[in-house]
Image (cartoon, rainbow, N blue to C red):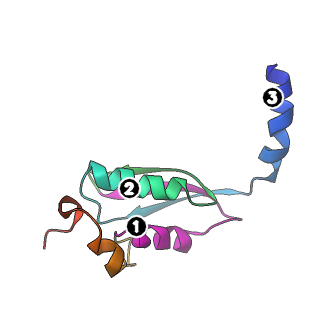
C-alpha cells in the first residue's frame, strides 16, 4: 500500500519547483497574530510552510520560487493587516484586526 501511495505522489513531487526560504520582520504581537498570518500563508499558492517567532517577530517562510516570490509573501502579510519588512500593512486590513493585535505606538 505504501508503495502505491508513493507512486501516486511521485509525479506531484517532481513538479514542485525549487524551494526557497525567506525571513520577514512583521508587526505581529500575540498568538492570534501568529495564527492569522500562518493561516493566510498556508492558503497561499506556493507557500510550503511558515513559522512566526513571536519573540523577535520574524516569520520564516519556505516557498516554491516557481509559484511565488518574497515580494508576494510580503504582500500577503500586509493584506493580512501586518507590516512585512518595509511593506506596510494595508490600512483597511489593519483596521479589521482585534485591538490586541494592533501596534502600540
Give the image quarter of residue 5.
top right
Q: Earlier in the sequence, mark 2 or mark 3?
A: 3
Residue 9 percent across, percent down from the top left: 80, 38
Give the image quarter of residue 104.
bottom left
Which residue is at a point 60% across and 69% down the rendered structure image? 69
Quadrant location, the N terminus: top right
Q: Are marks 1 and 3 in contact (CB under 8 Å)?
A: no
Q: Is residue 25 magenta?
A: no
Instruction: Between residue 32 and residue 55, name the one nearer to us.
Output: 32
Q: Are marks 2 and 3 in contact (CB under 8 Å)?
A: no
Helix, strand or loop at mark 3 = helix
Q: Which residues are magenta?
A: 57-81
Location of mark 3 (residue):
5
Give the image quarter of residue 64.
bottom right
Quadrant location, the C terminus: bottom left
Q: Are marks 2 and 1 in contact (CB under 8 Å)?
A: yes
Location of mark 2 (residue):
36
Instruction: Between residue 90 and residue 6, name the one nearer to us.
Output: 90
Helix, strand or loop at mark 2 = helix
Q: CA distance from mark 1 to mark 3?
A: 36 Å
Which residue is farthest top? 1
Amino acid at each position: 500500500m505504501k508503495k502505491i501511495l508513493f507512486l501516486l505522489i511521485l509525479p506531484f513531487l517532481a513538479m514542485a519547483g525549487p524551494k526557497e526560504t525567506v525571513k520577514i520582520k512583521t508587526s505581529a504581537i500575540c498568538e492570534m497574530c501568529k495564527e492569522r498570518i500562518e493561516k493566510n500563508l498556508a492558503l497561499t499558492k506556493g507557500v510550503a510552510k511558515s513559522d512566526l517567532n513571536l519573540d523577535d517577530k520574524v516569520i520564516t517562510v519556505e516557498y516554491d520560487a516557481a509559484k511565488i516570490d518574497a515580494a508576494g509573501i510580503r504582500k500577503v502579510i500586509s493584506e493580512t493587516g501586518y507590516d512585512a519588512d518595509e511593506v506596510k500593512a494595508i490600512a483597511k486590513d489593519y483596521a479589521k484586526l482585534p485591538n490586541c493585535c494592533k501596534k502600540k505606538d
